[in-house]
Amino acid sequence: AQKVTQAQTEISVVEKEDVTLDCVYETRDTTYYLFWYKQPPSGELVFLIRRNSFDEQNEISGRYSWNFQKSTSSFNFTITASQVVDSAVYFCALSEASYTGANSKLTFGKGITLSVRP
Amino acid sequence: GAVVSQHPSRVICKSGTSVKIECRSLDFQATTMFWYRQFPKKSLMLMATSNEGSKATYEQGVEKDKFLINHASLTLSTLTVTSAHPEDSSFYICSARGASGRYNEQFFGPGTRLTVL
């Protein structure tokens, strides 16, 4: 069975601080995909990144960066120089091996509520 | 591209009534649609997966007679909450997925907030 653990439930930082959101996953598949989504107060899920299990290179996109460590089954997300607009709930998710198959499902973590204070 | 809409965005109804929520893929054909439920401050729970023209596949513990799903066309799926009760109050989110290419991803709708009085 697949499982995603986001141990942090709520994080509060002051604007311009860096913040790291942790994600640990469990799967028996050798091929899988990991995701991060942002859910602002409006409720709509915003896709941030998808990473397959064969690609362990870290990725940076502007103020966002992701650290994939297969050895520790972790896929952590760092926001550099946080801004008030980063305040949202962030979900880490895992898909089964056949993600490219039409019916493959996403397993979500419980989410981390990030509050960035001015 | 890859826009998914939901209607209504918010609905309040009396206990015992049925409520229909629509999920539409606006600029691509969705061979598969997924319905999720999210309680306040909680994760998304997959309720069911539907393929166009086929019966939906429900997750364990989800009452198929309570939550009727119809995926009649490649751009529309509906979720009907039958005889709604206060415990059905929740945020319902759909996602749509195309068959190939750039649409071979789950694209999420904006969600529908259901409140049952």
Image (spheres, coloured by chain):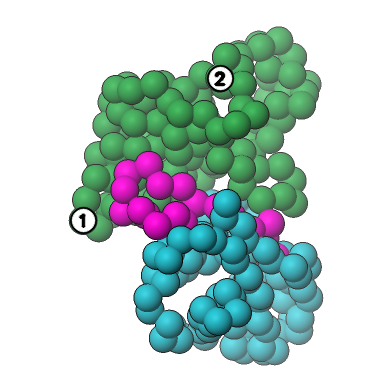
Chain colours: A cyan, B green
Q: Residue shown at 66%/51% (left/top)?
A: B43
Residue B66's x, y, as percent? 61, 17
In the picture, the quarter occupied by the N terminus of chain B is: bottom left
Say few, some or many: other residues with alpha carbon within 10 Å of mark 1 (under 14 / 14 to 19 / 20 or more).
few
Give the residue furthest to the left. Answer: B101
x 77%, y 23%: residue: B86
| Labels 1 and 2 share a subunit | yes
Q: Chain of mark 1?
A: B
Viewer can see residue A78: yes
Taking the magenta stretch, the answer to whether it contains residue A89 is no
Whether residue B10 appears in this view of the structure is: no
**Horizontal placement of B4 versus A28: left or right?**
left
The stretch in magenta equals: A95-112
Q: Label 2 is found on which chain of the structure?
A: B
A100 sits left or right of A39 in the view: left
Residue in the picture at 66% in, 82% down = A20
Main secondary-structure element of the magenta-colored stretch: loop
Above or below, comparing residue B84 to residue A33 in the picture: above
Screen quadrant of the C terminus of chain B? top right
Question: Which three-letter amino acid code belongs to the residue tagged 1?
Answer: Gly
- Reply above or below: B22 against B27: above
Q: Which residue is mark 1?
A: B101
Residue at image coords 50%, 33%: B48
Picture quadrant of residue B18: top right
